[in-house]
Structures are given as C-alpha cells and as structure tokens.
Image: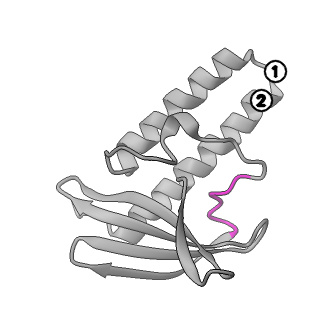
Amino acid sequence: MQELTAKEVFIQFSEAMYAWNVRAIKMKEENLPDNVRFEKQGAELIEIFDKYVTKRERVYGDPSSRNVRNPPEYNPATNEIISCMEEDKKAYIEVQETVGFKLKLRYTLHKKKEGWLVDKREHFRKSKNKWEVIPL
C-alpha cells in the first residue's frame, strides 16, 4: 500500500474534524444531557487525534478542550489549500478560510514511522506580521 502524502493526510484530518463538528452540532440540537453529549464528543475526538495528530502534551488544543463551532472551522468545501511544502520529515500546509473569520492558517505535519501526523496549527496575525499557535 502506498503511503499517503502530507496533503492527503491533512485533507483526511480536515474531513474527519468537519464531520465530528457537524455531529456535535446535531447532538446539541437533540438536547442530549450535557454529560452524555460531552462524553460522546470527547470519545470521537480522541479517535481522530489518535489517528491523525502527534502524541505529545499540548498547552492548547488537546481533545478534551475542543469547542464545537457553528459553522464548523474545518470545512474542506470553504477552506482553500494555498500551498503545501514537504521538507525531509516536516510539511507545512497553508490554508485560507474563505468564510467566517477568513483566517490564513498554517498546519505543520511531522513524518513519523506510522506516516504523516498533524502537529500544530497557527494563524497569521497581520498586526504582528507573524504566525501564532492556536488550538487544533
């Protein structure tokens, strides 16, 4: 089986996060008790992180601190990949949101023995002219 490229892994991660967010919105609309909803959402999110995200301690953006967004942030239909650069064991994917806050985002992926994994997400802060880490 052929190994996936960093871009392919990133697209799968984005699609999984988008689908998770859509399901989480529906759970909220179903008026499930908070504890049941949070448990289901957390379990699904941990599965996504286990498959697509590097294993390390995170100050921001671990699965337990993830917020549901409406509309979802990870939307492959409205987030345009503007560049993808692989160099050795790192890849950088820049994404432009075309709706909502219209942030310019950069994802860093690391190549591990199991393949490419998402490591961090940053947004470009124009006022400071630099990239700043934000939660996955």
| Magenta region, residue range | 72-78
Q: Please check the rendered image and state whether residue 17 is part of the magenta-colored stretch, yes or no.
A: no
Tell me if 41 is positioned left or right of 29 in this view: left
Q: Quadrant of residue 32?
A: top right
Q: Residue furthest left?
A: 113
Characterize the local packing of mark 1: few (<14), some (14-19) or many (20 or more) Cα atoms within 10 angstroms: few
The residue tagged 2 is 28
Q: Quadrant of residue 46?
A: top left
Name the amino acid type tagged 1. Asn
Residue at 75% across, 37% down = 25
Residue at 68% across, 72% down = 103
Q: Is residue 57 above or below residue 119?
A: above
- Front residue of this view, candidates 89 and 23: 89
Characterize the magenta stretch by its predominant secondary structure.
loop
Residue at 42% across, 43% down = 49
Give the Cα distance between marks 1 and 2: 5 Å
Tell me if 89 is positioned left or right of 63 in this view: left
x and y percentages locating residue 17 in the rendered image: 56, 49
x and y percentages locating residue 80 in the rendered image: 62, 75
Q: Is residue 86 above or below residue 116?
A: below
- Front residue of this view, candidates 70 and 8: 70
Mark 1 touches mark 2? (CB < 8 Å): yes
Q: Which mark is residue 31?
A: 1
Name the amino acid type tagged 2. Lys
Residue at 36% across, 44% down = 57
